[in-house]
Amino acid sequence: MTALGRPQFLLQFSEVLVKWRQFFNYLAAQQGKSDMCVLEQKLELEQLKVCQAVMFTHVQLLELTFYSFGLLLQTIDLLDWNSLINDTTKISNLLMIPNLETGHLEPLLNKFTTEEESQMKRMLQRVDVLAKHAVANGVRLMVDAEQTYFQPAISRLTLEMQRKFNREKPVIFNTYQCYLKEAYDNVTLDVELSRREGWYFGAKLVRGAYMYQERARAQEIGYEDPINPDYEATNRMYHKCLDYVLEEIEHSRKANVMVATHNEDTVKFTLEKMNEMGLSPTENKVYFGQLLGMCDQISFPLGQAGFPVYKYVPYGPVNEVIPYLSRRAQENRGFMKGSQRERSLLWKELKRRLLSGQVFYTPVY
């Protein structure tokens, strides 16, 4: 997504979305609801007017906005709250919220120029062209994830495409990085939104590739580390998110998930869950993905057993692809320690073929 528009726009739009969510979290905490599950947090509008006099004007704005939607609500949850920022919102007029220290209303960010507004529209048009091309060719479009300071904007733009193109089947997939502490909240919110609005949910689950960069930036700027404390915590988060999406597939058959992993335990976890749920690989609701040239001992048995398996292939000019692959190796250096087992399996298979006279292997199907 960062190739389709200026990174500065993604940064600014992400800042808006993060602050808007932080404002909701602040109001929820004021009402004693900060310990609740994110989908259970509901703001009482009457309580806001009584307890937050400084926010009275803003609460009136909320009521008028929801009234204009035809929603006479007494409470609003985070999904209702997020709907206040929609595709008709002019970015340069976006959101005045109280400064939590001074109590004065302030804009979330400096106004966009006319040119920046045009850049945003052109970016949306480019995404729209790609999505239409995917629909026309019967393929899925999976939007990759980036650093946390880009990701809120990327996820929101992807969400708008899902609303438009996932009406009949899942075409657009968003990527969820499970090394983030907020990964499960993000997955549950988007699944719930797809239920309410009646479109097909599509997710690619990854562990994440920017851990060292994210932690260094958090320490440098002075905000909370967004990454789970250790690899095991990330594994638990991945399985928790995956379990939730699989349950959604079992419940409605309207969700799809790409299990993008090189972790054998995660693949086994997925297969066991699918077996428990009676979810057949031929239904094409669950896909598996690995990098080309890595973990073929996972990819090939899955494919031979009838599961949809994809190999991730970076492509382009050598001078651009080599630095990209170098960064992936750098970011995934913890995983690369396990490559010795893969080499051992490859040698074992090579010896078996040479001794049996079966140098070339033909799959059953």
Image: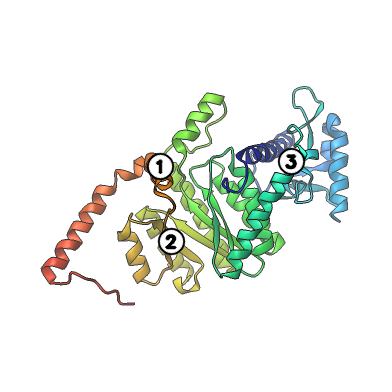
Task: Write down the residue under mark 1.
Answer: 323
Left or right: 76 as drawn, with respect to 293: right
Separation (CA) of disc 2 from disc 3: 41 Å
Task: Write down the residue under mark 2.
Answer: 288
Task: Write down the residue under mark 3.
Answer: 115
Q: What is the quadrant of residue 109 in the picture?
A: top right
Residue at 46 percent of width and 37 percent of height = 211
Q: Do the residues under discs 2 and 3 have CB atoms within 8 angstroms?
A: no
Q: What's under tag 3, amino acid-wise?
A: Glu
The residue sitting at the top extreme is 102
Q: Which mark is residue 158?
A: none
Q: Position of residue 74 (x, y in %)?
A: 83, 48
Residue at 79 percent of width and 44 percent of height = 90
Res 37 seen here: no
Residue at 65 percent of width and 51 percent of height = 157
The mark closer to the camera, 2 or 1, is 1
